Image (tube, grey):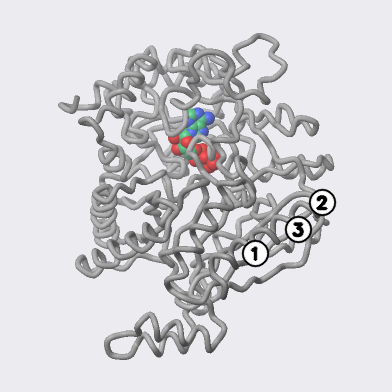
């Protein structure tokens, strides 16, 4: 068994004994076989010295037990790493950022404490998964939806803390934006409720986000100032119906009016669901699918294909250069009007735009629809379909072991999309690398795109090392252009935080000042998002 850094074996034995006294011996895990379960299966440092490992894990069942554990850990300066369900694959999984931390596994705290249909909100514990909440709502025939991420096996609480996102409407698809009220255990074991929860007997904890005075919720998201033991959420009241489809435009230069119109529709609230840019001409009609054979032939000519040649090919074969999904949720007359209005706006901007339209769907979904819908996340249905991407198949006999995403936030404008693609395409050529997937932007968060590039994780340290180096160069290159990551894996947390460097890293200094004040012994999730406690900052101020 590894020891937590800075803790003697005698002290650690005593701490584990005391943890057992709090939660029972069966909920303290110290064997190699048990702690191995907290390895990050997608770690880009897998098997290397720098891979992050837990020294032990402890699984409490209540806020009181979390408080008792934190008091013990604080007394002995034992680094702790709280997780909810620990399924944050691609962003660290269940492994601590600081190797040797004890994982505080909150999976057993899986109570759905309240779901209000009337106020469209819920209060849950960390171990409640999207599947749990979805099943509860469906079994009780409540007219509510939960916005789910890809994949839906993690927890609403953990995903919101990571600022994950989904596919339905705003603000629900920005999971942190839709949270309402926290209960947090601090490093010293004190318990705090934020927002209206600070008012004993509050009647609006899950309805009114602010409460009174400075809003402190933010320091707990992508932060390391507390163990969140309860979180409230706003849910979507089940819409009456859905209309979906796609806008398609034929020419390369149509991207500018296409994106400007998408942005206008979003900023006026006409389009509030997630959208993305697609290029059926370049990348096939299925996201990530192969390009059309004719396009491949054009591209493989000496010197490649010009934009005009590609456009002509697209026009002749009914393949738009760009397209974007349009999804509307609400009362039938409203979504009909929204779709018609959107069409008018796109046609005014690009007269040759065409549209695909899906049949109207009314809610609630039948069990069959919920089970068979092609795109479950668009209907608030959690699934594991995302794991089908790149899975083992006759055409892909040796799939990767995992991946990490490089995902900078860029403005919602065609200029930014073109610039970002140019900058990275040239860099990849110079560096001799080729990331995974289709480099087209997604709008998980309103007003912006994230331009996602994937890197495979394999069980070969040399390949992983090269990809890590590329990732780090991309962080710097992006920052040089004013693009920063919205979320990242532990391997890159320091690099990303270093890029947010205005006024000689004033933001990091502020985070660390708060960290030192709230957690003076620096025991909670050290290093998460590049925020380190004083004793682990070295010479850095
Ligand atoms: P999920 O339940 O969606 O799989 P995780 O448990 O993997 O999410 O959480 C993602 C990250 O968020 C964790 O690595 C941890 O740093 C942080 N985190 C998750 N749950 C809590 C919590 N209850 N309190 C404090 N931090 C948490």
Residue at mark 2: 364
478 left or right, relative to 231: left
Secondary structure under badge 3? helix
Q: Quadrant of the C terminus?
A: top left
Packing grade of label 2 (10 A; few <14, some 14-19, many >=20) is some
Report the residue marked by disc 1.
Answer: 343
- Residue at left 41%, top 51%? 411
Describe the element under mark 1 as helix, strand or loop: helix
Check whether the beta carbons of the residues at disc 2 and disc 1 lie within 8 A of each other: no
Is 487 on the left-hand or right-hand side of 135?
left
Q: Nearer the viewer, residue 102 or 307?
A: 307
Residue plotted at (46% across, 49% down): 448
Q: Quadrant of residue 73?
A: top left
Q: Estimate the spatial distance between the alpha carbons at disc 3 and disc 2, rounded to whole Å.
A: 18 Å
State which mark lies toward you, 3 or 2: 3
Is residue 232 visible in the rendered image? The answer is: yes
* Residue 458 percent coordinates (x, y): 36, 61
Q: Earlier in the sequence, mark 1 or mark 3?
A: 3
**Relative to the observer, which residue lies in front, 512 or 93?**
512
Q: Position of residue 19 (x, y in %)?
A: 49, 20
Q: Nearer the viewer, residue 533 or 502?
A: 502
Rendered location of residue 406, percent (x, y): 37, 53
Q: CA distance from mark 1 to mark 3?
A: 11 Å
The image quadrant that residue 455 belongs to is bottom left
Report the Cα–Cα distance between label 2 and label 1.
27 Å
Q: Residue at x 64, y 50 (%)?
A: 270
Residue 315 lies, in percent from the top left, at 52, 84
Q: Which residue is mark 3?
A: 336
Quadrant position of the N terminus in the picture: top left
Nearer-N-terminus badge (3/2): 3
Q: Name the element at disc 2.
A: loop
Label 3: few (<14), some (14–19) or many (≥20) C-alpha neighbours in 10 Å: some
């Amino acid at each position: 068994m590894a020891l937590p850094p800075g803790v003697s074996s005698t002290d650690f034995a005593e701490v584990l004994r005391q943890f057992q006294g709090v939660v029972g011996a069966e909920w303290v895990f110290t064997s190699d076989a048990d702690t191995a379960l907290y390895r990050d299966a997608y770690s880009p440092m897998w098997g290397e010295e720098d891979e992050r490992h837990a020294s032990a894990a402890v699984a409490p069942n209540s806020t009181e037990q979390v408080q008792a554990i934190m008091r013990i850990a604080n007394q002995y300066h034992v680094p702790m790493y709280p997780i909810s369900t620990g399924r944050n694959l691609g962003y660290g999984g269940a492994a601590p950022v600081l190797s040797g931390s004890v994982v505080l596994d909150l999976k057993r705290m899986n109570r759905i404490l309240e779901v209000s249909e009337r106020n469209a909100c819920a209060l849950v514990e960390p171990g409640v998964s999207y599947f749990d909440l979805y099943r509860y709502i469906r079994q009780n025939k409540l007219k509510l939806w939960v916005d789910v991420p890809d994949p839906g096996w993690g927890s609403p609480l953990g995903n919101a803390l990571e600022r994950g996102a989904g596919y339905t409407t705003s603000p629900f698809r920005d999971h942190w934006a839709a949270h309402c009220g926290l209960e947090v255990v601090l490093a010293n074991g004190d318990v705090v409720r934020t927002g209206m929860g600070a008012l004993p007997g509050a009647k609006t904890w899950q309805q009114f986000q602010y409460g009174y005075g400075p809003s402190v919720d933010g320091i707990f998201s992508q932060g390391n100032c507390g163990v969140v033991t309860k979180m409230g959420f706003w849910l979507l009241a089940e819409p009456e119906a859905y209309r979906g489809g796609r806008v398609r435009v034929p020419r390369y230069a149509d991207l500018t009016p296409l994106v400007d119109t998408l942005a206008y529709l979003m900023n006026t609230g006409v389009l509030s669901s997630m959208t993305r840019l697609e290029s059926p001409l370049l990348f096939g009609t299925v996201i990530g699918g192969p390009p059309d054979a004719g396009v491949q032939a054009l591209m493989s000519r000496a010197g490649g294909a010009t934009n005009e040649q590609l456009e002509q090919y697209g026009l002749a074969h009914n393949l738009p250069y760009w397209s974007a999904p349009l999804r509307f949720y609400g009362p039938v007359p409203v979504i009909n009007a929204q779709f018609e209005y959107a069409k008018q706006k796109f046609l005014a901007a690009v007269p040759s735009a065409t549209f695909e339209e899906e049949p109207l769907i009314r809610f609630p979904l039948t069990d069959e629809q919920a089970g068979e819908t092609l795109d479950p996340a668009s209907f608030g249905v959690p699934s594991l379909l995302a794991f089908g991407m790149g899975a083992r198949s006759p055409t892909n006999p040796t799939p990767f072991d995992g991946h990490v995403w490089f995902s900078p936030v860029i403005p919602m404008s065609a200029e930014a999309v073109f610039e970002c693609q140019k900058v990275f395409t040239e860099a990849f050529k110079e560096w001799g690398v080729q990331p995974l997937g289709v480099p087209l932007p997604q709008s998980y968060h309103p007003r912006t795109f994230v331009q996602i590039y994937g890197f495979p994780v394999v069980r070969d340290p040399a390949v992983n090392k090269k990809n890590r180096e590329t990732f780090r160069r991309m962080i710097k290159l992006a920052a040089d252009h004013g693009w920063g990551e919205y979320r990242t894996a532990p391997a890159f947390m320091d690099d990303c935080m270093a890029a947010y460097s205005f006024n000689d890293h004033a933001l990091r200094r502020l985070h660390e000042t708060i960290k030192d004040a709230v957690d003076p012994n620096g025991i909670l999730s050290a290093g998460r998002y590049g925020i380190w406690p004083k004793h682990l900052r070295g010479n850095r101020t």
